[in-house]
Each structure stands twice: as C-alpha cells, then as structure tokens.
Image: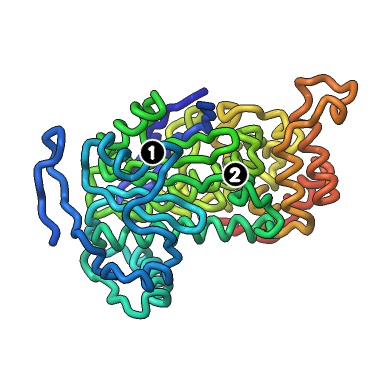
Amino acid sequence: MTMVTETISSCSRPRLVFLLVFLCATFIPVEHCLAQGKGGEDMEQFEGTCPYTKGERELEQKLGYERFGFITWRKGEDSTTIQETMGAIPMLWVETPHFRIGSSLGTFKLDNDREQRTRLKGEFSRLKGKLGKLRAPKKSLDPYLRLHLYAQRAEELYAQFMEDFQIDPEGLPANAPHLGHRNKFLLLLCQRKSEYGRYLKSYEQIEAPFSYRTGWHSDGMIVALSQESVSEPFEDKDLPFDVMLHCLLANTLASSFVDGFEQNLFKAPPWVTYGLAHVYSKRVDPHWTYFDARRESQINYADAWNWEPRVRNLVQNEFFTTTEKMLGWTTYADLGARDHMIAWSKMQYLVEVAEGDRQKFLSLACRPLSSTELGDSEPNKEPALRQRRALQEAFGLTPEELDEAWGSWVSKTYKKR
C-alpha cells in the first residue's frame, strides 16, 4: 500500500495552490518561552494551567471535555508514556466525546489573511459560547487555544458526518458507539516532523510524510498530522498554515470515518472515501486541496483549486469518468487528477442533494458481500456488485441514472468560471 506524499505544485499569492498527493488509506492490524528539548531541538514550553479554563472542571465540561490533561490512549498506553516515547516534548492532551487528542502544536502567528480571520472569528464565537468569555486574539494562537480549536473542529466534523449520513447515535451498537468502534478516534497533532516520526516508528513501524491514518479490528482508528510537514515546502511564511492544517484534518478525518464505518477497515470504495474527503476539505476552505496529480502535467495555474467550472466542462463535453468505471476502482492509485474532481462532485451530490437513505448507502457500499449474497458471481466483481446494490437500494439509482441526475445538477448549479 502506498504511503508516500509529495508537493505537486505551488504558486505565489494571492492564492497559493497547495496540491498534495493524498495519503493512501492503510490498515495495519496490529508564560511562553523557548527551552532546549530532547534531541537538541528548541521547543516552546507550555503553561502549566490552561489560561482559558484555569483548571475549572465546570468550564472543561462546558467545552465537552471528559478529561483534560492525563488521558488513556490505547490499551496499555497513556498520555505520559506516549509523550515520553515522542521525546519528552511539551504536549497537551484532551478527551472529548468522540476523540482522544494529543497536541504539540505551538504558538501560531496570525497573518492578515482576511478569510482566515473571518473563519476564526466564527470559531472563537462558538468557543466563547461554551466558555462564557473569550477575547479573540489579534496576533497569535497560543498552544492551549489551538488545542481547543482543534478539539472543536474534530467534534464538528464528526457531527457533520453523522448529519450527512443521517446516522442516529442511538442506533449504533452500545459496545461500539464510535461509528462501529469500541474506542474513540485518536488524533495526534504534531508541531514538528521529529516527534511525528518518532511516534510512527515506535508504534506503527512506518514512515509517512504529512499525515498517517490506520485502524484496528474491534478497537478504533488513528489520524496523525505534522504541521511542519505542511508548511515546510513554502518560503512564504505568511501563508495561512493553520487553515491548511485544518483542511488536512478534515480530509483525513472524513476518510477515516468512511474507512472505519462499521469496522469495514478500508473496504470502502475509493471514490466514496476520497470524494467525501474533498467535500469536507473544501467546506473548510476550497483553496487548499489535497489530491493525486501524479498522472497529470504539473498544475501550476493560480485557480487550480476551482473545480466547479472544470467539472462542468467535463460534464458538458461528456468527458467525465462514469460511475460504472468508478465502481471498478479498488485502490487509491486508480484515481487520476480529474477522477478526484469527479469523485468529489458525485459525493457532494449524494450527501447534499440526492434523496435517499445515506446511512444505508454507506453501510452497503462498505460491507463486503458474503458468499451467499455473492452467489455465482465472480469474487473479483464483488466490490462493483455491492456498490450497484448500495446505489439501487439507498437512492433507487443505477450507475447510469446517477450520472444523468448528477450531470443535470452540475450543469444547473456549477459556475462557468
């Protein structure tokens, strides 16, 4: 399974197009000051008490935190042991209703990006509604505020997924309440590549630039991200790297929600997984898109992020990837750059427009058919068969009918430029 990621292209302001190879889903069963950290790194030391909750349990609960500080990670591991393994670095830990989060993210200097500040204003407002009072920072986000923001972002993404797929929490198994998993999703947010790499080498025996995700049977899922890996390729230090990391978070979490749903563990169709990942990333900010452009010439024009007119042109010229062909995709490598755009658009249509039972679609599309259900059909056709069944039973559509309905919607909805 591919575990590589690379920068495809970059352009200068006003909008730098950030196109990365999307990380392939992998299942492996198995007072601020600078101080010298382990390994000779200069590390920002975090305050001992959160300046926003001030250690008051009531405020922590209003934020939805079940634990703040010491938390359990996986079986036999807790925040103390994980932190020591990662180099005894400064870290903050929190457990929310659906996540266990560890963060070494340091202070982030805010730039003058208007869209970033507008988005943050809304996020601060929602935090203030829980804390009762919060003065929005004008110059920087400190480590605690970043933790609170990412905890809120993760939970909001989870809630959006539940809403998009019409999933009733009460309908999930009592012993597997987290989209079919017993344990909560793990989210590791690293400031530097060094601690990110130490974690992966120690616990996953793997190297993966930018981001990593995996899952375990009857246990849970993990997403690990590195801020330094996101910002490292760029000389412009005023770029909205927090937004870029947020987009990567949305991308990888959405992928993990799909690939972990009902413990299918990466049996989901690639167009569903990666299409939804783009939907969630673009909801955060459409300008920072993660996808595979290895098969295309380098894309370095300033509006490469703007997919709507391109998809519209593909539809009108009947040059798009048909759903029938998409049913045959089995790995990430099957998708080219245009395929990612089409997968994004079709998943946008299914989760935002099409009438049907979205939870049923996800369940049927992700769960492999049994030998009885498969009948005399060839086993290598099983993924396509269950996807046809999912479309028909959940939306009443054949692959051809989906293309027709979706294409009509694109032509009426998407902008020409």
Residue 227 in percent (x, y) is at 31, 45
Lateral position of residue 289 relative to residue 383, left or right: left
Q: Quadrant of residue 8?
A: top left
| Residue found 82% across the figure and 19% down from its top | 378
| Residue found 24% across the figure and 61% down from its top | 142
| Residue found 36% across the figure and 62% down from its top | 148
Tell me if residue 411 can be seen. no
Q: Residues within 10 Å of mark 2 (few under 14, many from 20)?
A: many
- Mark sitting earlier along the chain (1/2): 1
Residue 298 in percent (x, y) is at 43, 33
Q: Which is more toward the observer, 411 or 381?
A: 381
Residue 324 in percent (x, y) is at 76, 34
Dot 1 amino acid type: Glu
Residue 202 higher or lower than 151, as above or below: above
Q: Quadrant of the C terminus?
A: bottom right
Secondary structure category for the residue under label 1: loop
Dot 2 amino acid type: His
Name the residue beneath numbered marker 1. 77
Residue 154 higher or lower than 27, as above or below: below
Q: How is the image coloured?
A: rainbow
Name the residue beneath numbered marker 2. 181
| Residue found 35% across the figure and 58% down from its top | 68
Q: Which is more toward the observer, 357 or 272?
A: 357
